[in-house]
Amino acid sequence: MTATADSDAERAESGSGPRAGIFPALLALALVAIMALAMLIGPVPLTPGEVLDGFFAPVDESGAIIVRELRLPRVILGAIVGAALGISGAAMQGLFQNPLAEPGIVGVSASASAGAVFALYFGLTSSIALAVPVSAMAGAMLGMLILFAVAMRDASVLTLILVGVALNAFAGALTALALNLSPNPFALNDIVLWLMGSLTNRSFLDVWLAAPFVMIGGAILFASRRGLAALTLGEEAARSLGVNVRSLRAQVIAGSALAVGASVAVTGAIGFVGLVVPHVVRPFVAHDPARILLPSALGGAILVVLADIAVRLAPGGQELKLGVVTALLGAPFFLYLVIATRRAMR
């Protein structure tokens, strides 16, 4: 990158000086507070003192089981998944220069879902404990490799979107075929419930499986912030500033695929987080693509943990699925964005 590009990127990254770090810090504090609140809420309400006792009680006590084995991994996994979806959505919107872009647009989420459905359809979970997440990761990686091959050919943004549409359609067709040919009602029920997305009954095994891929993917996306900032000037201007647009596309696709694929692998499909969160935080960072990634990750974590709290508080004693709640929140917001974008174009 040239000296001019470096100076532009540094100014974009630094924003308005020391005040640029206040908003992410506030989001981080809010996330910690909401995660602490989530530890108190559930079928068995706990006081703050009981939660603290649960961290230090013997492993076989009921309080320790609820706190350390049920709620803590659920809350941590919710934050990890939300952060992955939030930062991926912000990066995708910056790459495609489209406020309606989100992680599912490139087909990685659908590919991961198809991989998980494959494991459920053939009953692999009866013999392999991690069959669903491993198969989902394999599906996500396959989708990522297809997109990576296209991106490295210096394809246009439109081509990448069309490839994503094709991947979504093919993966959706495979999922529908599995539902149609489901060998028994139990397999059909497992597939449908998994596709709705949930954090219920997740353990630290799921956390350890997803966290490394999310961290690597998030680091790749965060490293792309200067290129995304330059891309706001247009591809030709970005190239003149020394940005390798082809490599930038591959970088964002790889980072998003790793982060989102790992998330879908352990929780199922959770939509609209990557679409909604960047729009909420963007005004607080002066619409700067270089500064939006970290706040979007924190905002995504907050949204998923809050949605999971709402899931537990659902009336009737039966938990809703997390993907259902995020869709109920995100679909109206998506419609609003479509209408607002059409008005802005007039």
Image: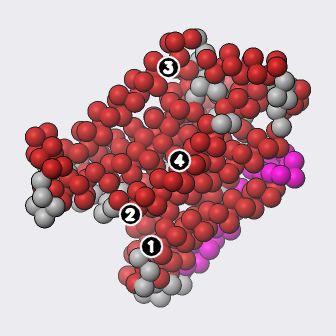
Residue topped by disc 2: 205
Mark before the other along the chain sequence, 3 or 4: 3
- Apparent side of residue 240 relative to residue 126 in the rendered image (left or right): right
The chosen color scheme is secondary structure
User: Considering depth in this image, is 77 or 170 the residue closer to the camera?
Assistant: 77
Residue 125 in sight: yes
Q: Is residue 90 depicted above or below 72 in this figure? A: above
Choose the circle earlier in sequence order: 3 or 1.
3
Near-viewer residue (207 or 44)? 207
Question: Residue 122 versus residue 76: which sits nearer the camera?
Answer: 76
Q: Earlier in the sequence, mark 2 or mark 3?
A: 3
Q: Quadrant of residue 110?
A: bottom right
Q: Which residue is mark 4?
A: 215
Q: Position of residue 157 (x, y in %)?
A: 79, 44
The residue that mark 1 highlights is 130
| Mark-to-mark CA distance, 1 and 2 | 9 Å
Q: Is residue 65 left or right of residue 103?
A: left
Are the two marked residues, 1 and 2, in contact with CB atoms closer than 8 angstroms?
yes
- Residue 340, relative to residue 251: is it above or below? above
Amino acid type of disc 1?
Leu
Q: Residue at x 34, y 41 (%)?
A: 306
The amino acid pointed to by label 4 is Met
Residue indicated by mark 3: 21
Q: Which residues are magenta?
A: 151-178
- Which three-letter amino acid code belongs to the residue tagged 3? Gly
Whether residue 196 is visible: no
Amino acid type for the residue under numbered disc 2: Leu
> Who comes first in sequence, dot 1 or dot 2?
1
Q: Residue at x 15, y 45 (%)?
A: 51
Is label 4 in contact with label 2 (beta carbons under 8 Å)?
no
Per the rendering, the mark at residue 148 is none
Number of numbered labels in the structure image:
4
